[in-house]
Image: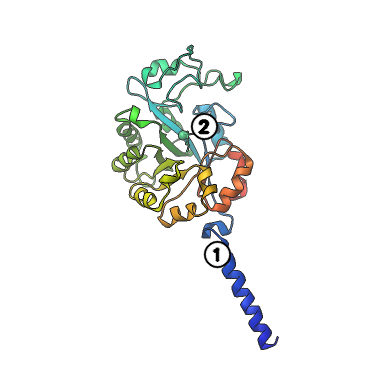
Amino acid sequence: MSASLKKVVLFLLVGITLGSLLLTPNARAAKPHKVDVIAHRGASGYAPENTVAAFDKARKMKADYIELDVQMSRDGKLVVIHDTTVNRTTDIDSKAPVKVKDLTLKELCKLDAGSYFGPQFTGERIPTFEKVLDRYKGKIGLLIELKEPALYPGIEEKVAAALKKRKMDKPKNGKVIVQSFDFNSVRRIHELLPSVPTGVLTSRPSDLTDAKLNEFAGYANYVNAHLGNVAADPTLVGRIHALGMKITPWTVRSRDEVPPLLQAGVDGIVTDYPDYVPKKIR
Ligand code: G3P
Ligand code: CA
């Protein structure tokens, strides 16, 4: 090869390499990488959300984590349910909204939390938080969301005590993360359980500026934004990673939503359908 041809080849090679680096939003996006599969409210596409049936199904489907929503009964017991009212997901006999916080544990546990999803799930109950910890500790990761914690003063202390009682507050806690849309609550959990990873939840672009991300980095390990935020801002995943945090966007309910998230370099995918995430990258 002549000297001038060598120069041209070298010039082209350098150009192609630089070009591909500039086009890649962040380094992790360049090749397929392992992501955590997080079963949203359990495998809630296949079984009634936030029930043992949905959590067991997630385990069967080899999810890495189950996500669950924690609230409190009138008598101060921690229960696993998403809405602040029981009407959508139970057989409560009332047209008027009935609040979780207005029912005792006994009253909540009488409700059927499966039949709304399908007759084969009749008899599923609203689980207590302690039951979920005991049943799944060390068997699958737990992404614990404090749902509307401002309605339940002292809920952070109770969640912390339940985790401590089971030594799930230690650095090697078998994959426990606590998250919330309520940032004050996340801060409080970080104070109470400094070794437990925490996450802030948001879908607001105004929470995803560099200034806000810097603030979150002071007390959170995850910034769990909506999948629409990832699509809207190609710099988001890289900016979160640059601050040493991770991102597990929510909520995948269609197979088409998976590839763009993988391409963006996310750390986990929150989904009602754990089987939508291809096995080879789990
Ligand atoms: O993990 C994210 C997700 O649980 C947040 O949304 O409303 O389903 O609790 P939501
Ligand atoms: Ca949730």
Left or right: 101, with 67 as reference point: left
Query: Is residue 252 among what the camera can see?
Result: yes
Q: Residues within 10 Å of mark 1 (few under 14, many from 20)?
A: few
Which of pointers 1 and 2 lies earlier in the amino acid sequence? Answer: 1
In the figure, 31 relative to 53: above or below?
below
Cα–Cα span, label 1 and label 2: 42 Å
Which label was assigned to residue 244?
none
User: Residue 192: percent from the left, percent from the top?
Assistant: 29, 40
- Which is more foreground, mark 1 or mark 2? 1
* Residues at marks 1 and 2 touching, judged by CB atoms closer than 8 Å: no
Q: Amino acid at mark 2?
A: Phe
Q: Amino acid at mark 1?
A: Leu
Residue that numbered label 1 is attached to? 22
Left or right: 80, with 22 as reference point: left
> Residue at 47% across / 48% down in the picture?
247
User: Residue 48: percent from the left, percent from the top?
Assistant: 54, 26
Return the residue found at the far top. Answer: 93
Q: Identify the element where label 1 is drawn.
A: helix
Question: Which of 138/223 is in front?
Answer: 223
> Residue at 29% across / 42% down in the picture?
191
Residue that numbered label 2 is attached to? 55
Question: Which of 274/210 is in front?
Answer: 210
Return the residue found at the far right. Answer: 1
Left or right: 54, with 132 as reference point: right
Question: Which of 176/242 is in front?
Answer: 242
